[in-house]
């Protein structure tokens, strides 16, 4: 026996990216635009979808709901009569903390791609791992809420840089919080200069129109965004 | 916490290149922007590698600094905090020149002597 050094030089996430590209081709062929929707747990992803998915003129929406366990979010969305497919991550490794391209690939046969124009993939609530794994999306959105603190972009730059849109939610709570919205916007700009931002409250509906229009824009986009 | 997912990705990449041979060391190139904690990565790697050809392999890494380049004024600089605006012209159209890497650079494998080598 002797030891040999073997040159590899390969991105460790190449395997995931290859599968993500295959997913993307399937979605492109079906004419479906895909949003990878990410945030920390409790930032309001599901509520933000509830508020708009049934009311996007000219856009048929489907949702792929990623959760470690359970179908609470999927049930909430299904009551709005949009097609929802549940994807639980628990059989793979005691509950993966993110969706990867392979998990999404396994869900593709269950997706009604012929009946939708826009697929929103609600990722597992987590500001770390989802930023690393592309799943075959056209574009990525993250939600941060004003209850999370102004410093989050500085603590999770990978996530804040991985998206094309940052949604800032729960602004109805600003009067009750020691939260400096300008500071958050400044920090976002430091970490991801000029990234698109929408400031809103899913609860009161303030700013929701911009979110709705943004999604309609993605569905209408001829060319890939990301 | 993403070190667990990243360890699995490393093991999968290494297994593919090891071609059945036992792996004794894995060398990585890790960019500073990947926010990888080396000790945590080693801890998970040891765990994820069990039962594969990577079991017991040594994990080494070279840490690459984060360097940015401004597309507006060509200024190039390195950062230690996540501030991505150009300090010279204030522009936001900035490219990451290095720091995003997460590569398996090489592996060390055991070969039996009888295999003919070129």
Image (spheres, rainbow, N blue to C red):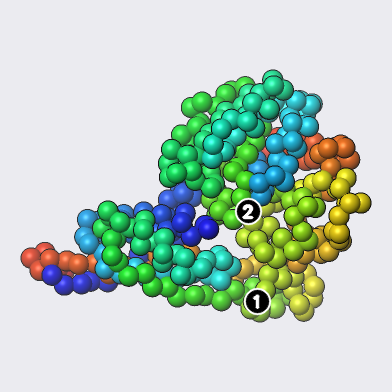
Along the horizontal axis of the image, is A37 left or right of A97? right
Q: Nearer the viewer, residue A201 or A147?
A: A147
Which residue is at a point 52% across and 35% down the rendered structure image?
A88
Q: How busy is the neighbourhood of tag 2: few (under 14 within 10 Å), some, or many (20 plus)? A: many
Q: Which residue is mark 1?
A: B79
Along the horizontal axis of the image, is A188 left or right of A111? right
The answer to which quarter of the image holds residue A119 is top right
Note whether A4 is above or below A129 in the view shown.
below
Which residue is at a point 86% across and 55% down the rendered structure image?
A177
The answer to which quarter of the image holds residue A92 is top left
Q: Is residue A185 visible?
A: yes
Note whether A213 is above or below B25 in the view shown.
above
- Residue pushed farthest front? A176
- Residue pushed farthest left? B114
Across and down, in percent, residue B85 comes to 74, 70
Across and down, in percent, residue A72 comes to 63, 30
* Marks 2 and 1 on same chain: no
In which chain is the residue bearing label 2?
A
Across and down, in percent, residue A139 comes to 65, 45
Q: Nearer the viewer, residue A32 or B107?
A: B107
Note whether A153 is above or below B65 in the view shown.
above
Spatial CA span between label 2 and label 1: 22 Å
Q: Which residue is mark 2?
A: A127
Q: Nearer the viewer, residue A153 or A73?
A: A73
In which chain is the residue bearing label 1?
B
Which residue is at a point 54% across and 36% down the rendered structure image?
A69
Note whether B74 is above or below A19 in the view shown.
below
Which residue is at a point 78% across and 52% down the rendered structure image?
A147
SS at badge 1: strand
């Amino acid at each position: 026996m002797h030891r040999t050094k073997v040159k590899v030089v390969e991105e460790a996430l190449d395997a995931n990216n290859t599968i993500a590209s295959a997913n993307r081709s399937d979605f492109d062929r079906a004419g479906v635009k895909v949003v990878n929707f990410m945030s920390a747990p409790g930032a309001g992803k599901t509520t933000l979808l509830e508020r708009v998915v049934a009311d996007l003129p000219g856009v048929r929406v489907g949702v792929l709901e990623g959760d470690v366990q359970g179908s609470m979010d999927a049930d909430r969305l299904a009551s709005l009569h949009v097609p929802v497919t549940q994807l639980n991550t628990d059989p793979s490794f005691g509950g993966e903390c993110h969706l990867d391209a392979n998990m999404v690939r396994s869900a593709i046969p269950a997706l009604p791609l012929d009946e939708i124009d826009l697929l929103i993939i609600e990722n597992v609530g987590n500001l770390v791992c989802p930023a690393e794994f592309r799943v075959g999306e056209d574009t990525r959105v993250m939600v941060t809420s004003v209850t999370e603190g102004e410093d989050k972009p500085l603590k999770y730059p990978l996530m804040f840089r991985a998206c094309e849109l940052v949604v800032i939610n729960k602004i109805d709570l600003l009067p009750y919080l020691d939260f400096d919205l300008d500071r958050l916007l400044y920090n976002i700009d430091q970490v991801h200069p000029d990234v698109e931002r929408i400031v809103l409250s899913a609860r009161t509906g303030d700013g929701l129109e911009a979110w709705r229009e943004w999604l309609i824009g993605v569905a209408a986009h001829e060319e890939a965004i990301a | 916490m993403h070190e667990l997912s990243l360890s699995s990705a490393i093991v999968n990449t290494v297994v593919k290149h090891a071609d059945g041979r036992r792996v004794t060391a894995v060398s990585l190139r890790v960019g500073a922007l990947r926010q990888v904690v080396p000790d945590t990565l080693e801890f998970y790697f040891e765990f994820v590698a069990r039962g594969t050809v990577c079991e017991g392999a040594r994990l080494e890494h070279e840490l690459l600094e984060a360097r940015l380049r401004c597309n507006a004024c060509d200024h190039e600089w390195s950062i230690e905090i996540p501030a991505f605006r150009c300090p010279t012209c204030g522009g936001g159209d900035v490219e990451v020149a290095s720091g995003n890497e997460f590569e398996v650079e090489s592996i060390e494998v055991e070969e039996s002597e009888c295999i003919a080598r070129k």
